[in-house]
Image (cartoon, rainbow, N blue to C red):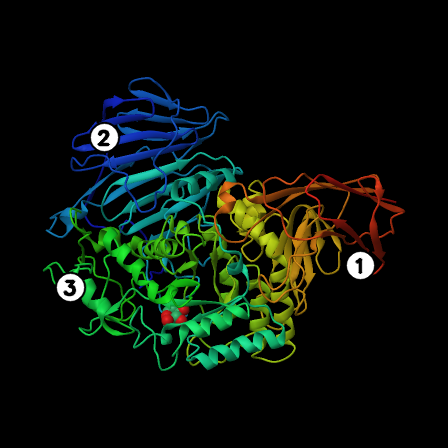
Amino acid sequence: MAEIFESPPSQEGRYQPLERAKLLDHDDRSIRMGVGLVTVEATALAPDLFRIGMFPDGRPPDYTSEAVAKEDWEPVAAEMTGDEEISFSTEAATAHISLNPLRVSFSDPSGRTFAADDEELGMGVVELPDADVFSAPMGSPVRLYKRREEGERYFGCGERTSGLDKTGSYQVFWNVDPPAGHTASFNNIYSSVPFTLSLVNGRAYGLFFDNTHRVEFDLAKASVDRVYYGAEGGNVVYYVFCGSVPSDVLDRYTELTGRTPMPPLWSLGYQQCRYSYMDESELREVARNFRERDIPCDTLYLDIDYMDGYRVFTWNRETFPEPEKLISELKEQGFNVVTIMDPGVKVDLHYPVYVEGGERDLFCKTVQGEEFHNVVWPGICAFPDFTNPETREWWGENLRTLTDEGVAGIWCDMNEPSLFVPRQSTMPGDVVHPGGPGAEPKYHAQIHNTYGSLMARSVREGLLRHRPDERPFAITRAGYAGLQRHALQWTGDNSSWWEHLWMSMPQLMNMGLSGVAWAGVDVGGFFDDCDGELLARFTEFGVFQPFCRNHTIKGSKQQEPWAFGEPYESVCRKMIRLRQRLLPYLYTLFEECHRTGTPIIRPLLFEYPYDETTYAMDDEFLVGNALLVAPITRPGIEHRHVYLPDGTWSHLWSGERFEGPAHILAHAPLGEPAIYVRTNTAVPLWPEMNHVGERPVDPLTLLLYPAEGSGESTLYEDAGNGFAYQGGEYARRHVLCEVLRGTIAVRLSVCEGFFTPERESIHLELRAVNTRPKNVLVNDDEADWDYEEVGGRILVRLAEDPGETTVEARF
Ligand code: GLC
């Protein structure tokens, strides 16, 4: 069960900080030191990335980790000086290592010191009074104490539903399926990313504590000037990302742990789910409603009831007699079908998946060597040992029972793993993961947090094998740092409560600050009954999530966008259409995220680390850098406070202009949520359509709110699926908008890349321009344009042209 308000260190035993160290050896990028049986190694992996490892009990350095995607770092020229007080420097930062006692700190050329060991407590091992047989392979608990610099604030920590600022808090990293109706006071829930982004005077650095045992952080809770990172066993391995802006930290962090893959474009459209659409006629009915009501939707879900007795990789042929036919007919209407799967494999001697898994020895074991069993949806189950590469391959091969029928993507659930005995528990720590031939078996306690990631990895790899030319679509509920390279994460079972609508914002922003950018919560809420106003407001927020899916539990009221009648259906339609129109913008952000790790929805502090007012802004967010969204999160309210950071912002609906930084009161009646557009920053929009591919993207609109000054933005396009973009088949254009002494100039750069969008025209839509221009020129010729007084709208129609295009409106 998730924990509430606890303080570490929770382990027993006597903590022994490292004392005097001996320098053992060093090379260009690493220094090794010894303290008795403990080896400590400091490595410069990149100019702004250091790794520190502490290996007790004579264990050799080992950095293998499910989190780490990159091992082949370029050579770095690191220079070592000193002998007792060693400086180990790259061009971007210095690691300072004092040998007596062994302490490590960092500085950069600006003179700031960061991630400095606590003088007194440093790093070390907890000596346990009497280590038993079980704890032996785990090793002793390990700890790392760092000094908190004056004013230092901590962010990140993965999926946390409380606010953004984690300073003064205690954090547990241990994946659990929390009880229904979790609140912001819960600590750990489904996934674990033991990573902090620190800000001191607006300058950033990151620290990733890579340990897959149960991990705890005390972020200056017990003592205001000290932080603690500890684990129940294993080694201390941590990475310091020297920054010094949040985007640089995230860039390196996601280079290390892997980037979000490019999504198939269809998966960015609106998605509809329910536990469960029980049979094919119900699913067809939902599909029909979407199209008849003109509400965009790209994806429909089958929850566990499509299976035969919840047996994974089977179909219930009574309720879904011809899945292939059903799925292909839905595909013709523009719907993709995604199916759920759980790790538990029903113990049933007539069920080939179970029999084969057992025969090939692919399941987890008890310490006595029996198959480990527990209860999940299908009854008594065995659990795949996903640490074994053969298991992952086998699981991935079994996906054919779904992909052969045309299933478009896979939703991995219950993979903390969640067990029913006792209710919502997880595997006992002494369950054994044999790991396959030649592997060193591991106790579950050693790898617990990776179980979800490893399942998602087997699914992604399987999908890629079955359809090498398509981008896999995989969802996971649980995972560990780096899970973003296998699957998107949806945040499990929220509730149809206003509080959960609020909580979704810090939760998704915290995930984005921890590398898990492709994420979303169940729109409308999972547990309990939704109502029309809550669904409408939830949808006003939800359409900006990187993953936008409405989902609810069995027995709850229907929750599809039309379920509560008017005016809510119209609000949902309007918002879902807005999302569909925004797809080129979202897609551009996904490509940026894929390349640099920059989150898609961002806390204001990501762009404005120097503005400490942003640190508390957990109920509004940026989508890319052009849109600021501030949802209403209470019933019966049409107004709310919004903080607009530095810059000029235009209200999306009225065009009203504001100069930030400013605190304002926004009027946001149903259907007009508070959305602000950064001026001079183009937002690309598609024409209205009900699903991806329904019609050509022609014209593409570039929406701009011009204001004195200038701004730049980007449009990225490619085929929307497949991998040709990696060979240069993409089109990237920059849009520069300059407003100077009454002239608005918009310049579209030459198109980079070899992809040719299939369309004839681009519309430039300038809004909130109060006077009619005297003339509008395109590359010095009179343009095809008109002006509407309502909304001060100039519409310029341009022919699609990959060359440089300049539009000038003169007044
Ligand atoms: C879990 C999932 C939920 C799903 C249900 C039935 O509670 O989190 O989304 O609907 O299981 O499969």
Mark 1: which secondary structure? loop
Look at the picture and state if 177 lies above or below 274.
above
Res 627 label: none
Q: Do the residues under discs 3 and 2 have CB atoms within 8 angstroms?
A: no
CA gap between label 3 and label 2 equals: 44 Å
Q: Which residue is mark 2?
A: 19
Residue 450, position as x, y percentages in the image: 30, 53
> Which of 313/594 is in front?
313
Q: Residue at x 76, y 46 (%)?
A: 707
Q: Which residue is mark 1?
A: 791
Res 371 label: 3
Viewer can see residue 497: no
Side of 557 where 758 appears, left or right = right
Mark 3: which secondary structure? loop
CA gap between label 2 and label 1 equals: 70 Å
Which amino acid type corresponds to the residue marked 1 in the rendered image? Answer: Gly
Numbered disc in front, either 3 or 1? 3
Task: Work out whether mark 2 precedes mark 1 in sequence or the reverse, and give the earlier one.
Answer: 2
Task: Work out whether mark 3 precedes mark 1 in sequence or the reverse, and give the earlier one.
Answer: 3
Mark 2: which secondary structure? loop
Q: Which quarter of the frame holds ligand 1? A: bottom left
